Each structure stands twice: as C-alpha cells, then as structure tokens.
Amino acid sequence: MNLFTVFIIEKLKSLLKLKSVFFVPNNVCVGENSVIDTDLNKSVKLNDVAYNILSLLDGKNTIEDIVSILLKKYNVSKQILERDINSIVSNLQDKNLVECKIVGNKILVFFFNLAIGQYLHKKRYSIPKSKIATFLLLFYIVVKKLFIMWLITIIPVYFFISNFTLDFNNMVNYAIGCYFVFIFAMILGFVLHEWIHIVVSKIQNQEIHGYILAKRFTVSIVKVNTESSLLSILLGPIVPSILGIVFILISLKTQSMMTFLLGIGFVINIINLLPFTKDGKGILEKILMKKLMKGAIK
C-alpha cells in the first residue's frame, strides 16, 4: 500500500475518531514461552518481551498505548521500544497470529470496515465442523468482500430504473437480472470450489487443521496437516465447471440467456485448471512428481 493511500486512510480515521487496535484471534493461545495456533496445531516460540507485548494485545490497546505501558517496565528509549513492538506485531501478523481491527463509534466502524477496513486487514475464520456451516461461512465471507462491487452496481441500476421510460425499463430490468444471475453464479462457483477442497480433505484425512483467511480482495484456505491430494485439487474447479456445462446445455434447449449466463458463471472455474493458477500448478506438480517417482522406481 503506497504512502499516499496510508496517509488518506489515517486522516479519515482521525476525522471519524476511529483508531486501530490489535488482538490475538480466538484460536490462538498465548503462553509465556510460545504462542500456539490451535487451528494449525503449530506453535511459535516467544521471548519475554514478545510475551509482554502479546499480553497487551487485547483489542483495546493501540501501539501507542502498548509503548506507554512498556516504557514504565523497560529502561529503553521510546523510539527503540516502538520499533521493536512494531517489528514483533508485524511478524506475528504475517503468520496470522495477530489481527488488527478498527474501534470507535459502532455505526461508523461498521461502514468503515465494509468499505475500507476489510480490504486493509486480514481476518481468519476457523473452519466449522459442519460441512453446511462451512459452505455458509464461505458464502458470507465472499459476499462481504464484494461490498464495493455491490455499491458500484446499485448506483447505476437505480439511475437507469428511475430515469428511463417503462418500455425501456423492461429491457433494463432483464439485463440487470442477467447481470446479477451471472455474478451470483460466479460467487456460488467460487464458494463451491473452495468448499469442495475442504470437504474432500476432510473425507480423506478425517480431520483438517486449518482456517479460512480473508485477505484484501482474496479468500483462501490455510492448512498444514497434509498436502492437498490430486483428487482434492481437481474436484475443486471441475465440479462447478460440470454444473455450468449442464446449465449451458439447458439454456440451448430453453433459449434462456439467464440460464446461459448462470452456466458461464460456473464454467469460469475451469480456468483454475490452467498451469498459471494455484490449482493448475498444484495439479502439474502432482503429475510430474508421480512421473518422477515412477522413473525412480524403474
């Protein structure tokens, strides 16, 4: 993020009397010697300074508050302490062991997070045990991430509907309907894609250690217990793509543009099979590894 953007955001926060505070996510446990990520079943060692800093990350203290508190405990200059605190917090944020949130007036915070905050700060969500709950959680996260798109779309839609004649409105309404069906299919296809990755991993491994990470404009699955199998990687993009092909075939018979766009929205997932995508690279690596293993055995 460039300095100008940071400057504007900080000025906006100051104007709205909002501030950034840090906290440790629910499934991260802080001990005197280590911080344990129970979602991943991993731990990171801590020294005394890092422990004292983490113990103050309660969702109420800003970096300035923590500096003020620890200055009374350590005989060190304010600049050095602030630098060390920022370094430790930043390092733990990179590992998704510390999160940042905006606090202040609840209404202002709600709208600030929707429009700006969720694209600035990462947020992790533990994977529910229920497959249905996992699907609904993924759907909620993705729809929330698309808030800016909804805002940009609704304004021109309202303009068209309120400023054109009734006859033209029918055409506009159908076009808008087609657009929303296409977007809905893309969202549902993506959610189905990621959900299948999780479900197949759960079925194959009985238990999955990981979480869903919402970061800027992306949503991904972070897990460590086992590598994703070839079947898990393949089924993610293939299942929604097959569903999309079915809708396209139906649209050819019914001559329905809306159904056709519904199919296209799902079929777009097939792009994830290409080698330059994350899934495509994973598939290629698995296939090449199998061939290398066969060659080694011979």
Image: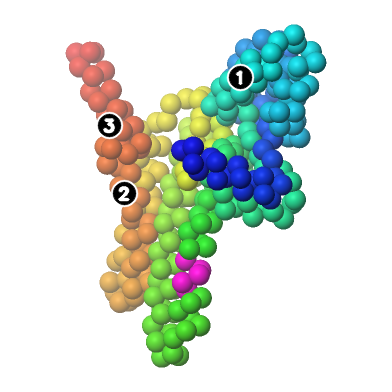
For mark 2, what is the residue?
Answer: 270
Q: CA distance from mark 2 to mark 3?
A: 15 Å
User: Would you say residue 149 is visible in this rendering?
Assistant: yes
Question: What kind of element bears circle 3?
Answer: helix
- Identity of the residue drawn at 46% across and 55% down: 187
Q: Residue type at mark 2: give it.
A: Ile
- CB contact under 8 Å: marks 1 and 3: no
Q: Residue type at mark 1: give it.
A: Arg
Question: What kind of element bears circle 2?
Answer: helix
Looking at the magenta stretch, what is its main secondary structure?
helix
Percent coordinates x, y for residue 250 in the rendering:
33, 69
Task: Using a 10 Å C-alpha cutoff, classify the residue at mark 2 as few (fewer than 14 neighbours), some (14 to 19) or many (20 or more).
Answer: some
User: Would you say residue 216 is visible in this rendering?
Assistant: no
- Identity of the residue drawn at 43% across and 26% down: 227
Question: Which segment did they paint magenta?
Answer: 153-157
Q: Which is in the foreground here, disc 2 or disc 1?
A: 1
For mark 3, what is the residue?
Answer: 284
Q: Is residue 249 above or below residue 146?
A: below
Along the line of sight, the residue nearer the viewer: 236 or 122: 122
Percent coordinates x, y for residue 159 in the rendering:
48, 77
Numbered tag placed on residue 74 in the rendering: none
Q: CA distance from mark 2 to mark 1?
A: 46 Å
Q: Residue type at mark 3: give it.
A: Leu
